[in-house]
Amino acid sequence: MILNYKDLKSTIMPNKSNTIETLRTSGLRPTKQRVQLAKFLFDRDKTFHFNVEDLHKTINLKNNKKISLATIYNTVHAFKNAGYLKEILIKNNKSFFDTNTKVHHHFFDEKNNLLTDVSAEEISIKKIPSPPAGKFIKQVEVIINIANDNQKQ
């Protein structure tokens, strides 16, 4: 059973037993670290964008018990594979993750390393090339790279 972010938030949070049951329903073993990361990622009002390294630093600043980078990496990818997170690939093979799994677009601020949501309705694409033979277009997402006004080139 794959739930989207809204379903995850409403079923996982804030009750710990709901978190455990939702993880189990998704085929994920509810380890202490997974429950803790799920609460951190999904118990919030706004979409959360992050990369694994920054999440590792942030989560370990807030915790008495440290979670290894490998555990966070594996948990984030397990949540992604279960449909709870969306991975966004930025140039130079940098991955960000997004708690909003619905189709939408992003601004990417290279200087501050931040993603900001742009709703799908705000972008109009007039022409999309045909995919290669034997392939189909699954979805289209736009990333708009932004910089400060004083950085124009």
Image (tube, rainbow, N blue to C red):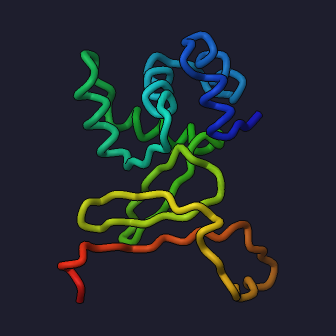
Residue 31: percent from left, percent from top: 50, 18
Q: Name which residue lies at 56% across and 38% down.
A: 78
Residue 131 in the image: state x and y as whole percent.
73, 83
Q: Residue at x 42, y 41 (%)?
A: 73
Q: Exactly how many numbered labels are in the figure?
A: 0
Q: In x, y percent, where is residue 95? A: 42, 57
Residue 44 appears at what percent x and percent y?
47, 32
Compared across the picture, whether 74 is left or right of 130 comes to: left
Quadrant of the drawing holding the C terminus: bottom left
Q: Is residue 104 above or below residue 20?
A: below
- Image quarter in which the N terminus is found: top right
For the point 77% across and 76% down, the residue is: 135
Between residues 46 and 102, which one lies in front from this camera angle? 46
Q: Nearer the viewer, residue 75 or 119?
A: 119
- The quarter holding residue 13 reads top right
Above or below, comparing residue 107 to residue 85 in the picture: below
